[in-house]
Image (cartoon, helix red, strand yellow):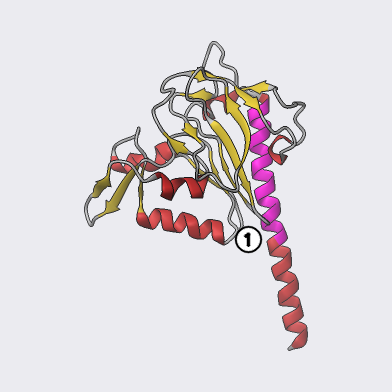
Amino acid sequence: MKRAITLRSPKTTSARAKDPDNPPWSEEMLGRLNEFIDRGISVAFISGNNMYRKVQFLQTAISVIEWMTPPEQVVPLIGTYYDAYGYKTFDAYQVVDASHWCFEGIPIEEGSEFGHGNTSRRGASGWETDKIRTGTHGFRVVAVGKNSEGPAFMVSRDLQDSFVFTVGSVSFTPCLDDDPVIRKLMCNLVRRALAAGLNLQKAEERINNVAVRRE
């Protein structure tokens, strides 16, 4: 099965550069991500500040070659870009496009809110947030944080048999523990990616069967 979801947490990736607040990406990593998307592999970024430092991998070290990866390289890939506007503010998301498949089976409508903070954690839109830019072409905004400034933008680019989905917020993943909307939304992402993979597998099996019969 070639098509599956890639759940990327930038904090995990960045540990290799010992700079957990500034996730590094090299030209090779950006190129591979672009290749995955072109091949129809579904990709989900479930955090914020997803691409920041531009690095180069050396034999025994990682070298920072640009303080910030240029937005023109990031935005077309994931639909959003990080800036410090709204840093360490927290709030819930507000639904913008309730008809999007990520909300399938969830009793919400446009204007509904989810990811509110509680006594054990902050709101789902916060800490470090990614926003849409002028280069955000082909992405649908499905929800936006209610932060007083610098809210996270949740966006989706729906391709023929795959998708690129970005939640745009570092404080999103802790809400998986107890927020029913976020848990269901994540299930929808995984289910859709797996369904696309199964469809591809069945198509390849049919092609192989035809080839065998012709032989």
Q: Amino acid at mark 1?
A: Met
The structure residue drawn at horizontal position 69% and vertical position 40%, both measured from the top left corner, is 188
Query: Considering the numbered disc 1 on the image, is that residue within a helix, a strand or a loop?
Result: loop
Q: Which residue sits furthest top?
A: 119
In this rendering, the answer to whether 129 lies above or below 56 is above
Locate residue 114, reporting x and y percent: 64, 22
Quarter in which the N terminus is drawn: bottom right
In this rendering, would 85 be left or right of 155? Answer: left
Residue 189 sits in quarter: top right
At label 1, counting other C-alpha atoms closer than 10 Å, the crowd grade (few under 14, some 14-19, many 20 or more) is few
Q: Nearer the viewer, residue 163 or 118?
A: 163
In this rendering, would 18 be left or right of 81? Answer: left
Quarter in which the C terminus is drawn: bottom right
Q: Main secondary structure of the magenta part?
A: helix
Q: Which residue sits furthest left?
A: 60
Q: Is residue 136 inside the magenta stretch?
A: no
Locate residue 78, reporting x and y percent: 51, 45
In this rendering, the answer to whether 198 lies above or below 121 is below
Locate residue 136, reporting x and y percent: 53, 44
Q: Which residue sits furthest bottom?
A: 215
Q: Nearer the viewer, residue 124 or 180?
A: 124
Q: Which residues are magenta?
A: 181-199
Q: Nearer the viewer, residue 59 or 45?
A: 45
Count of marks, rendered view: 1
The structure residue drawn at horizontal position 41% and vertical position 44%, both measured from the top left corner, is 71
Locate residue 75, reporting x and y percent: 48, 45
The structure residue drawn at horizontal position 45% and vertical position 38%, both measured from the top left corner, is 81
In this rendering, would 127 be left or right of 172? Answer: left
Q: Nearer the viewer, residue 153 or 19?
A: 153
Q: Is residue 198 inside the magenta stretch?
A: yes
Residue tagged 1: 1
